[in-house]
Image (spheres, rainbow, N blue to C red):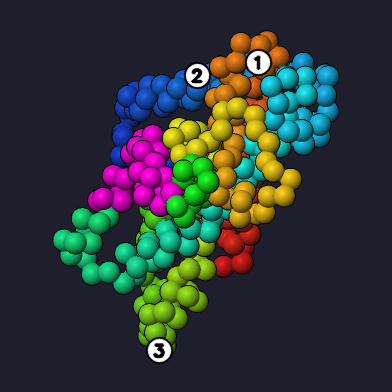
């Protein structure tokens, strides 16, 4: 006799629904597919519109010239270097403050804190803060980092400095970092913790050598995507000192002067150029959006690469 393979899941599914067809499930799946297709169509139209509007810039100037040129009121020579440099420095603040603080907070809440009313209230507050509009964080940054801490963040510019912008963005993404890290830690099976404790590991050793390596792909993905969100925020920066016009820094300025001085960023520059009446700035705005999309895609690809790498090593 020749043994025939049986598709057990299909047989079980068929026995559960009998001879009837799951008409509602089929209609629902087609509606979901239509929604996905409609979303992708809208995204494709928007991308095509932006890319085609940027063609005049790429036809007249090279990518290097556009990226490395300084801000200017003349659209023929204006570039985005100051805005790109400002955005990169802002992301340094986000990485230095939001990620260590957020990861440490999530580790405490998931691995050390007792499940009581206080910890549940803190978790609820963090999840609510993740949904607060970014303009509210801009007002918070204006009140604390500009008004209250102005003598430290930027004494020469009344607190409206790059330090204030970076700290505001760090506070903005902090709840997201905590939530994504907590979810990654919660996804680690308890059997790993129990096995480590069973062979004599301390709670710190269990977290350091067993829990964190398993949760690392999820933590990295969440934190890098948080950086991508901070990279595209404009509203908070407009409140804490983002420049909407061109400016020149002093030739003898130190790095501390740069941190405590006025700044520009790519989302702020998009907001500024989109309001200008000159036709040339329309093409520049589209070209700037294309550059921002490329940078965001690189950030997302970095997240995917790091996640896949850690999944292979764990």
- 253 relative to 178 in the view: left or right: right
Quadrant of the rendered image containing residue 24: top left
Q: Which mark is residue 282?
A: 1
> Picture coordinates of residue 222 (x, y %)?
49, 51
Task: Verify CB contact (< 8 Å) between mark 3 and mark 2.
Answer: no
Residue count near mark 1 (Cα–Cα under 10 Å), binned few <14, some 14–19, many ≥20: many
Would you say 234 lies left or right of 253 here? left
Residue 26 in the image: state x and y as whole percent.
39, 25
Which residue matches tag 3?
200
Q: Which mark is residue 38?
A: 2
Front residue of 32/27: it is: 32
Q: Tag 1, which secondary structure? A: helix
Q: How many angstroms separate mark 1 from mark 2 (CA)? A: 27 Å
Circle nearer the N terminus (1, 2): 2
Q: Earlier in the sequence, mark 1 or mark 3?
A: 3
Viewer-nearest residue: 58 or 138: 138
Residue 165 colored magenta? no
Depicted 266 relative to depicted 170: above or below: above
For the residues marked 1 and 3, what is the alpha-carbon distance in whole angstroms?
A: 65 Å
- In the rendered view, does 298 fall on the left or right side of 27? right
Residue 181 in percent (x, y) is at 43, 57
Residue at 45% across / 22% down in the picture?
Answer: 35
Q: Which residues are magenta?
A: 124-150
Residue placed furthest toward the left: 117
Characterize the magenta stretch by its predominant secondary structure. helix
- Please tell me which residue is depicted at 77% across the width and 16% down the height of the picture: 56
Q: Is residue 267 above or below residue 204?
A: above
Image quadrant in which the N terminus is located:
bottom right
């Amino acid at each position: 006799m020749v043994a025939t393979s049986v598709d057990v899941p299909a047989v079980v599914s068929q026995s559960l629904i009998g001879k009837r067809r799951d008409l509602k499930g089929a209609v629902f799946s087609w509606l979901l597919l239509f929604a996905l297709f409609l979303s992708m169509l809208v995204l494709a139209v928007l991308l095509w519109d932006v890319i085609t509007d940027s063609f005049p810039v790429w036809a007249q100037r090279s990518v290097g010239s556009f990226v490395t040129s300084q801000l200017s009121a003349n659209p023929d020579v204006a570039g985005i270097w100051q805005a790109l440099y400002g955005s990169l420095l802002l992301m340094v603040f986000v990485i230095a403050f939001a990620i260590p603080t957020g990861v440490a907070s999530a580790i405490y809440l998931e691995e050390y804190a007792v499940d009581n009313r206080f910890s549940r209230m803190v978790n609820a507050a963090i999840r609510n803060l993740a949904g607060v509009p970014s303009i509210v964080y801009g007002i918070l940054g204006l009140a604390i980092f500009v008004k209250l801490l102005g003598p430290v963040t930027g004494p020469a510019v009344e607190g409206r400095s790059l330090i204030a912008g970076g700290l505001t963005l760090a506070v903005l993404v902090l709840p997201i970092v905590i939530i994504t890290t907590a979810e990654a830690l919660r996804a680690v099976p308890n059997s790993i913790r129990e096995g480590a404790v069973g062979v004599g590991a301390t709670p710190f050793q269990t977290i350091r050598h067993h829990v964190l390596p398993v949760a690392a792909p999820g933590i990295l993905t969440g934190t890098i995507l948080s950086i991508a969100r901070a990279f595209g925020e404009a509203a908070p920066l407009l409140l804490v000192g983002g420049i909407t016009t061109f400016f020149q820094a002093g030739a003898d300025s130190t790095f501390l002067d740069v941190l405590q001085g006025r700044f520009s960023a790519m989302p702020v520059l998009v907001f500024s150029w989109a309001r200008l009446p000159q036709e040339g700035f329309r093409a520049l705005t589209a070209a700037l959006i294309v550059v921002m999309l490329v940078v965001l895609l690189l950030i997302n690809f970095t997240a995917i690469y790091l996640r896949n790498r850690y999944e292979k090593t764990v």
